[in-house]
Amino acid sequence: EVQTLVDQYYLRAQPDVAQRQYAAIRGVLATLEDRYTFFVDPPVAQSESDALAGTYGGIGVQVNRNEAGAFVLFPFEESPATAAGIMSGDILQAVNGMDIELSTPPDQVDQLLRGEVKAGSGVTLTIVDAAGVSRDLFVEFAVINVPSVVWRVLLEDSDIGFVQIIRFTSRTPDELSTALGELEAAHVSALIVDLRNNSGGLLQESVDVAGQLLGNGQVVVYEKSNQSERALSATNGGGGLKDIPLVVLVNQGTASASELVAGAVQDHERGILIGQRTYGKGTVQQIFRLSDNSSVHITSAEWLTPNHRGLESVGLEPDLPMIPDANGRDVELGEAVRYLNEHYNLG
């Protein structure tokens, strides 16, 4: 009836039919008062799909901050960054002539290194190598198949392996297995897993990841719906590193599936958490793709840790809480290295 009246009497041009339908859907979902139940139109839905698949336009480099606050580059294999000559450990000084300050937000730096893939598109970087030599490099943009896991033996302590899980995608369990295998071959004696600013991703993949850290048979999470509760347990076992000392880094950006992994490590006393209280997203959303390639996210269950702790709006308290450094220095990583060396006989 309302649409009939609008069609008959409304003064101005109306949005197209699809936009009116989208608005109606959003209105219905808004009555649920659940910020995690929402509608996504086709372009954004495709972007979400790309994120879970792990692709974007850019130069193919991971950017981390060291304890001094500088932005350190770690290029992906077979990426434009590697082809241009960027080496792991190079320091980023400027992008397109704009100096990168210690106060520059990390997400802003990340966005500067991404862009539309077309002929001649790219960025000019000013970098400083390990010898202290500064140089400018032009790096072209390309479609990057983003690894969800990056790893290395720490430059500052070769007894410690470092694994950063960026997001839980369909490739994450296999990538983590490769990472742990290479670190085992490097004879590391302890492991740091970085879940900071990991906003989550796919549930089953996070359970598989937890299994590689915990071992077979351990409950990772309980999933409680309005009809039942079920335990999700590790089935893929752990490799040769599942018994070595473990620290997990977390912060306020650690959310959803990454909280499941951190909570399982903490509840099973497999390792300790260092950092800040996590975000506190303890609900499950199913994503339904609609006929026009839009999608709707619907909250269908809540998560509980192995000790039946709820996460929603509470998060996880680290075993060793830390205040983020005002100048952006990676104090959590430094503290993890100190903790492992003080509490275990590494080497």
Image (cartoon, helix red, strand yellow):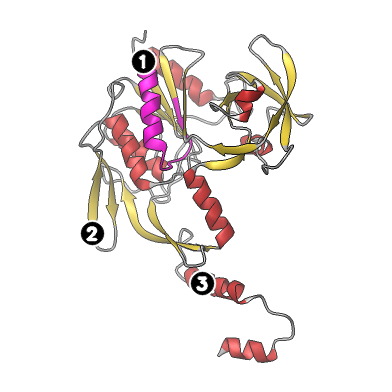
Q: Give the side of residue 270 with respect to residue 114, left or right.
A: left
Residue carrying label 3: 25
Residue carrying label 2: 228
Residue carrying label 1: 185
Q: What's the residue at 57%, 37% (across, down)?
A: 144
Judging from the image, what secondary structure is the residue with disc 2 in?
loop
Q: Quadrant of the C terminus?
A: top left
Identify the amino acid type marked 1. Answer: Ala
Q: Is residue 71 above or below residue 144?
A: above
* Separation of residues labelled 3 and 1 (CA atoms): 53 Å
Quadrant of residue 237 in the image?
A: top left
Judging from the image, what secondary structure is the residue with disc 3 in?
helix
Q: Earlier in the sequence, mark 3 or mark 2?
A: 3
Callout 2: 10 Å neighbours few (<14), some, many (20+)? few
Identify the amino acid type marked 3. Answer: Ile
Quadrant of residue 9 in the image?
A: bottom right
Identify the amino acid type marked 2. Answer: Ser
The residue at the far front in this view is 119
Question: Which contiguous range is marked in magenta?
Answer: 163-190
Query: Who is closer to the viewer here, 301 or 76?
Result: 76
Q: Residue 37 carries which label?
A: none
Query: Who is closer to the viewer here, 97 or 323?
Result: 97
Report x, y in % for residue 325: 58, 28
Judging from the image, what secondary structure is the residue with disc 1 in?
helix
Report x, y in % for residue 294: 52, 63
Q: In this view, does 293 lie above or below 199?
A: below
* Separation of residues labelled 3 and 2 (CA atoms): 28 Å
